[in-house]
Structure formats: C-alpha cells, structure tokens
Amino acid sequence: MTKIVPQPGIMDIDLYVGGKAHVEGVSNVIKLSSNENPFGPSDAAQEAVKRVLHDMHRYPSTDHAELRSAIAEIHGLESDRIICGAGSDEIIAFLCQAYAGVGDEVLFTEHGFSMYRISALAAGATPVEVKERERVTDVDALLAGCTERTKLVFIANPNNPTSTMIGLAELERLAEGLPEQALLVLDGAYAEYVEGYDGGAKLVEARDNVFMTRTFSKLYGLGAMRVGWGYGPREIVDVLNRVRGPFNLSSAALAAAEAAVRDVAYVEKCRSENARLRAWLSEALGEHGVSCDTSMANFVLARFRNQAEAEACDTYLQKQGLIVRRVGGYNLPNCLRITVGDEPACRQVAHAVGQFKAGAT
Ligand SMILES: *Cc1c(COP(=O)(O)O)cnc(C)c1O
C-alpha cells in the first residue's frame, strides 16, 4: 500500500461534471447546458484581447488595479475591497482555503452550486447541506443549520440550478442571525440578470460578515477567459490576497474583462434580450405541460413528472442536437436546466419539448 496519500476530504470530492458540448453523431448542436451568453462576448472585449497579444511575453499585472478600478467605477464600489480570481470559482476556493479547515463546517442549500461542496472538501472542511423550501433558499433552515463550527455560508442569489432568488430583507435577516464566526457569501453569478439588483453590494458595505462574488462568465460571455471577482470587508480581501497566486489572471483575461465591464450598452442589450426570451421560453414550455419556477437568471429549470420522463426528454432533445443539463446531481432528478439561448434556439428547444410531450421518441 502506498504511503503517499492525499489530505482528508480530497477523495470525497466527486469530479465536477460540466455541461455537455457534443452529441455522438450530431454535428450541429445547440448548447444550452452551461448558462453561457448566446450572443457571445462584446466586440470591445474581443478587440481588447487582440491589443494585448503582442505583449504575451510579459507577466501580467499582479494587483489587477485597472480591472478593479473599472469594476469599482461601473458598479459604484470601492476598488480596494475588490479581489479578482480565475473565475469566481477561484474566489470560492480562496474563501474555503482561508476560512475553513478540518473540523469546520461550510453551509449551503440542497440545490446549491456544486463548487461549494468541492471547495469545502478540498480545504478539509465538512460540507453541510440544508433543505430549501420548494426550490427556494430557506433562511430559517440555514440559520437552524449553523453551529459553533460554521465558518462559511454560501448562497447563490439567484441560485443555479433553481433560478429562484430571495429578497434583500431575507438576506439581511440571514446575515443578522449568523453566529459571529461565520461569513455569509452571496454568490452573484447571475446578479446582472436581475434589473436593479446590486448582488448584495450594499449589504457588504453595511456589515462586516458579508462577502459577494461575481463573474464574467455568464452575462459578459467570457467563460473561457476565467475572470471573477469578490467584494468584501477590507480585512477579508487582505486575507484572500495572501492565498491568491500573484499572476492568477492572464493579460488577455484582464483586458477582456475590463473592456466588457465598460461596455454597458452591450450588458443592457444582453440583459433585456435574456428577459424577453426567458419569458417566452417559460411560457412555451408551460403550454406543453412542463412548468418552470419564475426564473431570475439566464436559464429555466424545467420540471417533469419524474426522473424517467426528464431523462427521456433529455435523450430526445440530444437526438435533435439540443444539449440541456441534467441536474440529478443537484438533487433535482425530475428536472432539466435549459439555458436561455438566442431566439432560434429557444424556439427549437420549446418545439422539441412539445414533440416529446406529444409522444415523439
Ligand atoms: C457559473 C457559476 C459560477 C462561476 O463561474 P466562474 O466561471 O468560475 O466565474 C459561480 N456560481 C454559480 C452559482 C454559477 O452558476
């Protein structure tokens, strides 16, 4: 037997399963499985990447000052309370690494984003899951789930894969009720899709136990560039910067993100197109007997009668070249998560679900 063994918790991690991108034997697929922006990145972001290519031999910025000031300016935040990561996944990992270890608990909800569990286990901490109320974050359950060992409480608002969110009063009640050693992390990966919602930034500023994460992977269409950021109390940002690698973001990623955050017109266009197509898609699915909760994000969670029907529908959609996401791993075996695509994609997926419900196989 080998004596070379990993740290506790590591072997309990199930490998992350990403959204499928291919179907055997189908060449032209429509990918609606990873909540990507169907309109792609803004032209400004693409141009910005081209401009930095000739400097590829230089190391990138270590403090991300320019990107942080662009984010601060556009969102009305303080730039020295921002930290940037290789996707918000990296910020989640920093939080777990810095604040949770063996014997500590990391709390999240039963349909919470899978990286909370993975990062908690990677840090040696114990993931603890609490119930939701009909696919909505339940503040009472979270508060009841806290112990003196709870160090981090993660909620995505809106949440993936449920698409639902809770309001500011509930967020405040949660922050207020946490034990004093616990930090509330508001994952705002989909915050941009909610008109007038700041992702929890004001709550971060009003309290010392709230931290917000955001990403460029969803509305900004930069998933491949891997850029996310966090906003929190200065002391926490200082702690996270100590575990952050000095060159964690490439020059291309920094340039793309800065241009993207400044392209407010493009952001607005993507937000409004998503809202329009999302409403159309939910209604069309509803007409075919498939209900969805009211989505606040760029995907809908389609509910089927049972797991067998959801899986059969997924198989049928794949044959039509339509890739959606099974969410059995999120304790939602009777559901499929469908990203809101462009208009032709929404029409095709709704039509195909209709044919499936009408008996096609
Ligand atoms: C997609 C997603 C993220 C982050 O993605 P990154 O690409 O790592 O920024 C974080 N949280 C939730 C809930 C997500 O759905």
Image (tube, rainbow, N blue to C red):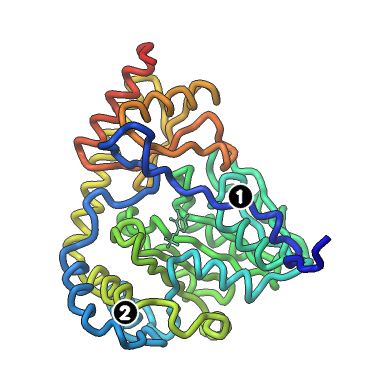
N-terminal label among 1 and 2: 1
Q: Position of residue 17 (x, y in %)?
A: 52, 48
Residue at 32% x, 73% y is: 253
237 relative position to 317: left or right: right
Count of residue discs: 2
Question: In what element is the residue under mark 1?
Answer: strand
Q: Quadrant of the N terminus?
A: bottom right
Front label number (1 vs 2): 2
Residue 236: x, y in percent? 56, 80
Q: Amino acid at mark 2?
A: Ser
Q: Residues within 10 Å of mark 2 (few under 14, many from 20)?
A: many
Residue at image mark 2: 251
Instruction: Look at the image and tell me in which quarter the C terminus lies.
Output: top left
- Dot 1, crowdedness within 10 Å: few (<14), some or many (≥20)? many
Question: In the rendered view, would you say 81 is above or below 179?
Answer: below
- 115 on left or right of 195: right
Identify residue for label 1. Answer: 109
Say which amino acid is labelled 1: Thr
